[in-house]
Image: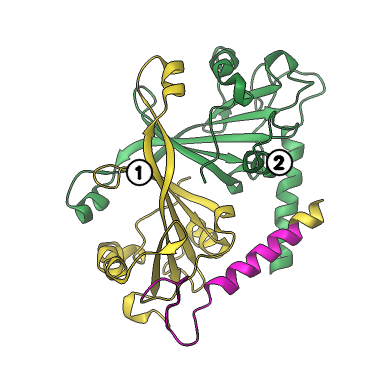
Chain colours: A yellow, B green
Amino acid sequence: MKRIGFLLFAVATLAGIVAYMPHASGQSDGDSSPIYGIKIPAGYRHWELISVAHEAGDFDDLRAMLGNPIAMTAFRNGTLPFPDGTIIARLAWKYVPSAENNKVFGRDQSFIAGPATNVQFMVKDSKKYAATGGWGYAEFIDGKPADEAVHKTCFPCHIPAKDHDYVFTHYAR
Amino acid sequence: MKRIGFLLFAVATLAGIVAYMPHASGQSDGDSSPIYGIKIPAGYRHWELISVAHEAGDFDDLRAMLGNPIAMTAFRNGTLPFPDGTIIARLAWKYVPSAENNKVFGRDQSFIAGPATNVQFMVKDSKKYAATGGWGYAEFIDGKPADEAVHKTCFPCHIPAKDHDYVFTHYAR
């Protein structure tokens, strides 16, 4: 069983690497993010946890940042800049109250992950994405990439985090 | 490198299994939770994500629930009751505003994981823990188990979730 588990993990990892390899043409197809040509990395939901956050306001979500093995090693060791091959996944779900939990606590205090909103990825490739700090970006809603206008906002928004290699999230110990 | 990674994973997994094995005497030592005799499972911070939550009120935390491989398979397949060997880890961090993120968004909306508060575990062993719904409980603060009074509150608090095998959290897809 353990051997099978490792084999599955190896297959998922390899599939992930293949899935995020940019198209030779640099063009986006229906499955890839505009501008950056990034597909959803296979198996990302199995990656380890970097940290969690709550964005109120218009986002109104609970989010989790997961990292592929290269990302996790870099986060844990404080390696900057992140090495090529790093992928960070940002999952987000609607921020919804839990009636079940609130009944237990006897007060309205519990908020849990509702329906998924979108998934975002940052892929480090210092040569391919040299013009955007070494990072490619991607957002998917229901498995489909968001449009080019959305993807034009990614890098400018991340510039304030330049001192942490354009990554806002820090590892939660 | 991949082989070494698998080996490390295997060692961590085995260490985890050994770490949560109850003492033959049933007594707690300084490293184990009172009543249930559970130690911190080695490698739990590498487990996959079940879901996230925000508890306001007295807790005032952001939390992430992680699961060992048995837990993750059960959550994804909707298996109830959870099989013996399931371990759920509940990590929690102080709910703190992020000045850095708020500057980017131009408003106070961003809350991130601050210092860790405590870590809790649920360990499924339907025979050993038959008197408490098949689950053993453990809370650790800075690596040290909380006291017996704390552990007496675990099972009563989880009874309202009996229909989901005493587990409040659902898998976030």
Residues beneath discs 2 and 1 located on the same chain: no
Q: Is residue B7 left or right of residue B55?
A: right
Residue beneath disc 1: A61
Disc 2 marks which amino acid?
Ile
Q: Tell me how far mark 2 sits from mark 1, CA to CA.
A: 28 Å
Residue A119 position within the rendered picture, expressed as x and y whole percent measured from the top left? 43, 56
User: For the magenta stretch, what is the residue range?
Assistant: A6-34
Which quadrant of the figure contains the N terminus of chain B? bottom right
B93 vs B168, left or right, is left
* Residue designated by label 2: B70
Disc 2 chain ID: B
- From this view, report whether residue B137 is shown above or below residue A4: above
Q: Is residue A1 magenta?
A: no
Residue at left 72%, top 13%? B131
- A142 sits left or right of B95 in the view: right
Q: Quick one: which residue is furthest to the front in this view?
A: A30
Q: Does dot 1 land on a helix, a strand or a loop?
A: strand
Residue B30 in sight from this viewpoint: yes
- Disc 2 crowd rating (10 Å Cα; few below 14, some 14-19, many 20+) is some
Amino acid type of the residue tagged 1 in the rendering: Asp
Q: Is residue B5 visible?
A: no
A21 magenta-colored = yes
Q: Quadrant of residue A57?
A: top left
